[in-house]
Structure formats: C-alpha cells, structure tokens
Image: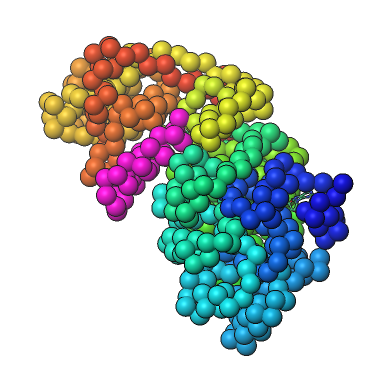
C-alpha cells in the first residue's frame, strides 16, 4: 500500500524506500505534529521536511543559516520539479520581490530563508499573508549558546510558535548531546515534541589518536602510508598553522589548499569548489570549513590540534566517509595542546560558569584522548548511545597498556611544589622535565636547579614518557597551567592526594608497535 509520503518519495525523489525514522517523522509532521530530529550528517534530514511540505497544503518554510547551501538545495529541488526558492541577502530587490509574489500566489512548495531575514518585519508580514505548510528549523543546534555554532538570531525563532501556533515545526540537527537536545527543545518551545534520535555511530570511520611529536611529519607519513592520492581534510586551530601546513604538504607532493576566515571570500569559494570538484585534494582548514559541505568521498579527516569539544570533534571527523566506505579519523595530540587550551580557557572572556563549561568540554575531549578503552564507545557515550567495543579503532585494534604512574607523578608534583614553596618559582613542562631527568642545561645552571633534591630523580624515564605523564596529569586536572598565561605549571586541589599516596594513577602507554611506527615516521 502506498501512502502519500511513500508515493512522494518514489515519484518526486526517485527513491525506493525510507531510511531509519524518516517515514515516522514525515507522517508525524504531515499529521500536524512538531518534532525534534537528530540524525548524523548524511542521514537524510532534508526529506523529513521536504516531503511533508509537498504533501501538506501551503509552503514549507525552511530556516537555514547557510546561504551557499540554500542555493544548492533549491537548485537540486528545481531539477526534481519541486517549486522551491529562497530569500537571502545575495538577491537584489527585484528577485526577492518575485519570490515573495510566488509565495503569496501559493506557487511555492518550499521557501528557504536565513534566520536574520525571517525575523524582519517585512518577512513576518509576508508570511502572515501566505499559507504555511510547516516550519523547518535546520541546524537547530545554532540556538545553543554553549555550542560551537551559536547564532544569536536563532534565539528569535521562538516567535514562530507564538505567531503560528497551529503550524507544525520541525527542528533538525546533527548534534545530539542530551544537554543540547534539551536546550533546543526549550529555546524553540518544542517542549511536547517527540525526539527522533538516529544512531550516531559511523562504523566505517576508523578512529585513531596518536601522540604528537613532530606533527607535520607525522601527518605527512600518515597520508603517504594510508591515504596517498585520497581526498581529505586537515583541521588546525589557527590561520597561520593552516597556511604553513598547506604549504608543507604541497612541498612534499600532497596537493593541498588552505581555507580559513582570513582568506578573501572569492579565494575561499574557489578553494572550496576545487575541493568539491577535483579528486585527491587535501583541504587544510580551520573549523570555519565544513558545515554544509557535502563531499561523500572524503577518505580521511586529520586533526593536528586538539578540538575544543567532543561534539566539535564528532562533527568534524564525521565529514569523512559519508559514502559509507572505509575512512580514517586521525588526531595527533600532545602535552602542548593541553597547556594551550587550558590557558585559552583561563584567558577567555565570559563569566565563571562559561569557563567551567568550556573546561568540562575540554575534559571530555581529553578523556577521549587518554582512554584505554574503545574510542567509539567513549565517543558515543557522550551522545548517550551505548555500544560494545567496536573493533575498528586504535585501542580496539592495538590495546594500549596501562602502567602505574603514581611514583612518576609524585616526582613531578613534588618538583613543582618545591620550586614554588622554597623559591617562589614556577616553570613550564620542558624545564621541569630537564630537572627530573638531571639535564644540566643553561637554564638549570642559571637557576641552580641542579642543587634541588629532585634533580635527576627521574632519569629512568625518557623525555617523551615524562611528557606523557605531564600530559595526563594536566588532562586529569592533577596539575594546572597558571593563570598568568606563561604556560607554567602549578598544583591543584587534586595534586595533594597523589602526593600523599592516597591516589594511584594508571596511565596510558602507547602500544610498542605504534610507538615504533610513530618514531619511524617522525624521523
Ligand atoms: P542530512 O541533511 O541529514 O545531512 P541529506 O538530507 O542531505 O542529509 O541526505 C543525504 C543524502 O542521502 C542525500 O543525497 C539524499 O538524497 C540521500 N537520501 C536521503 N534519504 C534517502 C532515502 N530514503 N533513500 C535514498 N537516499 C536517500
Ligand atoms: Zn573501538
């Protein structure tokens, strides 16, 4: 038996059957219900509002923050014979006028509008005068003030419920933490709407997190060994690093393009369209790149700086392997990342609760990096989805050993304690490691640190092992980066328990095989 929704799927869109919850969502909205839809990117959210818009009387109004994407969607719909149009700032008034007229005449199935445009008096008046089938709020997580894509205009969208209480509203996002989900429902006044939550697992993506040493060389070795000639994305934190890394890859025979907000609009657009069109290009980018970019055959996503949150990491790494074929999410992470990010949080604007939230997000990300359990399990835990160990991540494939780092941690914490207590001095990671390993550097001599009782007590561990200890102490907040912003280290509340021997500290040790591989590739 065909229903109107299935019929539309087949005759208009040319697809055989629905995926996942699509049918349930579509029928619910056709029946006039509100809904919150959480599906990973590529899951098929668009049909969830496009089909009800076609089946219900009137025009489906789609609120989308991405002007470039609107154009693509409308073009694709027009090709299918769907009467679609958009209103945004890229149009002149004459074009906008035509679209408005078509809407008023009931000649549009779908109308895409940017949120800032929607909230103008002119647009509100227009909508009052036409017939609306539904409101679809795309990228609904933009309403979350804590998220990485917050857009203040989204807060104004609660007005839709007040002015059109009878029109079904559908909020869609690929972001799925329980907190964000609740926040979306609350801010958009979707309290009674059912949540349709799809699985967020991306089984074809192999997750791997490596210890950072010389990151550009590691990246190059990774690409050459596993993804030579493949299309990929490399995420960096700063514009300068984007430029350097793109140049470096090009110099070593990997065709790469930069993308960041400091490039002019035309350059960004040109690089993006080359990336989409050509095979085997690597886009080196800040997180400004990616939202709404739909390239199914991205074979790897690499992060050479630590992402600020698990959620951001999930979104960015999720741009790999949308075609369902094997893909890799590769992340290099080291001591310096923890130092830098803790410092950035300390120096960020905003009140304490804001900083605490950033801190909690970072902690979750660090937890993912330091876990000795399945990465995917940990990642999905964050979205309240629970799975068995996956067999397709680095820890499943080469389980890391855990070792008792309590004594090592005590050595380093007591060095920090002594320097501060006895001399009122604070130092960064490098100098502390030199002291522990008994290295007579200029700095050590200058400060007379060779006379400290802790000098040389850590000669049994390599420098990289010490960096690992420090990194994990920082990750667990058993050591803090100072507030003055020089990257010097200080004790925390938690340090005491370790110093007193009340807490044992099990630390992650990279598997032998991987360490060797990492060294070989970095040399
Ligand atoms: P999202 O918005 O969730 O990222 P899209 O709506 O863009 O995902 O859909 C991703 C791709 O999957 C599109 O190419 C779309 O045409 C296709 N798709 C969606 N639903 C179906 C279906 N039921 N059968 C076949 N293809 C589908
Ligand atoms: Zn796993």
The residue at 67%/69% (across/down) is 59
Q: Which image quadrant for residue 343? A: top left
Left or right relative to 433: residue 171: right
Residue 9 at least partly seen: no
Left or right relative to 23: residue 125: left
Q: Please identify the quadrant where the C terminus is shown.
A: top right
Instruction: Give the prevailing secondary structure in the magenta stretch.
Output: helix
Q: Position of residue 231 (x, y in %)?
A: 70, 49
Considering depth in this image, is 131 or 275 the residue closer to the camera?
131
Badge count:
0
Q: Which image quadrant for residue 11? A: bottom right
Please state the extent of the stretch shown in magenta in the rendering: 339-367
Q: Position of residue 352 (x, y in %)?
A: 26, 45
Tell whether position 410 is magenta.
Answer: no
Q: Position of residue 327 (x, y in %)?
A: 70, 39
Q: Which image quadrant for residue 463? A: top left
The image shows residue 148, relative to residue 371, as above or below, that is below
Left or right relative to 126: residue 298: right
The image shows residue 47, relative to residue 58, as above or below, that is above
Q: Position of residue 330 (x, y in %)?
A: 59, 38
The image shows residue 417, relative to residue 252, as above or below, that is above
Considering depth in this image, is 512 or 126 the residue closer to the camera?
126
Left or right relative to 60: residue 378: left
Considering depth in this image, is 184 or 422 the residue closer to the camera?
184
The residue at 67%/23% (across/down) is 391
The residue at 41%/38% (across/down) is 362
Residue 100 at least partly seen: yes
The residue at 58%/69% (across/down) is 113
């Amino acid at each position: 038996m065909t229903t109107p929704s299935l019929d539309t799927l087949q005759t208009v869109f040319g697809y055989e059957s629905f995926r996942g919850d699509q049918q349930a969502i579509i029928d619910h909205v056709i029946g006039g219900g509100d809904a919150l839809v959480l599906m990973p990117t590529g899951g098929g959210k668009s049909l969830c509002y496009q089909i009800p818009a076609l089946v219900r009387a009137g025009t489906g109004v789609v609120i989308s923050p991405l002007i470039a994407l609107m154009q693509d969607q409308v073009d694709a719909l027009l090709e299918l014979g769907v009467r679609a149009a958009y209103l945004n700032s890229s149009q002149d008034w004459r074009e906008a006028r035509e679209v408005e007229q078509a809407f008023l005449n009931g000649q549009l199935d779908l109308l895409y509008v940017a949120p800032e445009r929607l909230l103008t008096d002119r647009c509100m008046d227009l909508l009052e005068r036409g017939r609306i089938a539904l409101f679809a709020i795309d990228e609904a997580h933009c309403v979350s003030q804590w998220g990485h894509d917050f857009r203040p205009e989204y807060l104004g969208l609660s007005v839709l419920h007040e002015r059109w209480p009878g029109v079904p509203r559908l909020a869609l996002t690929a972001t799925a933490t329980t907190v964000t989900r609740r926040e979306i429902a609350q801010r958009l006044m979707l309290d009674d709407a059912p949540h349709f939550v799809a699985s967020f697992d991306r089984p074809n993506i192999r997750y791997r997190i490596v210890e950072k040493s010389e990151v550009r060389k590691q990246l190059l070795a990774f690409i050459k060994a596993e993804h030579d000639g493949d299309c990929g994305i490399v995420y960096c934190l700063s514009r300068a690093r984007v430029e350097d890394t793109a140049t470096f890859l090009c110099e070593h025979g990997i065709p790469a393009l930069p993308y960041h907000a400091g490039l002019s609009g035309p350059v960004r657009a040109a690089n993006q369209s080359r990336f989409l069109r050509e095979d085997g290009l690597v886009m080196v980018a800040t997180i400004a790149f990616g939202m709404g970019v739909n390239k199914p055959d991205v074979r790897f996503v690499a992060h050479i700086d630590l992402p600020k949150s698990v959620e951001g990491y999930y979104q960015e790494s999720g741009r790999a392997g949308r075609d369902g074929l094997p893909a890799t999410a590769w992340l290099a992470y080291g001591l310096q990342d923890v130092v830098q990010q803790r410092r950035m949080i300390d120096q960020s604007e905003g009140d304490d609760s804001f900083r605490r939230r950033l801190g909690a997000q970072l902690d979750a990300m660090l937890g993912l990096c330091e876990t000795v359990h399945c990465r995917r399990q940990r990642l999905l835990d964050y979205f309240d989805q629970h799975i068995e160990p996956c067999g397709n991540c680095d820890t499943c494939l080469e389980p890391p050993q855990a070792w008792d780092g309590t004594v090592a941690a005590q050595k380093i914490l007591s060095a920090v304690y002594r320097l501060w207590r006895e001399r009122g001095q604070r130092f960064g990671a490098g100098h502390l490691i030199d002291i522990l390993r008994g290295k007579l550097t200029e700095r050590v001599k200058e400060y007379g640190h060779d006379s400290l009782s802790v000098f040389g007590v850590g000669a049994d561990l390599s420098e990289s092992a010490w960096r690992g200890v420090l990194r994990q102490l920082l990750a667990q907040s058993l050591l803090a980066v100072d507030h003055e912003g020089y990257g010097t280290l200080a004790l925390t509340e938690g340090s005491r328990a370790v110093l007193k021997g009340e807490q044992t500290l099990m630390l992650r040790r990279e598997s032998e095989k991987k360490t060797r591989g990492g060294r070989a590739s970095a040399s």
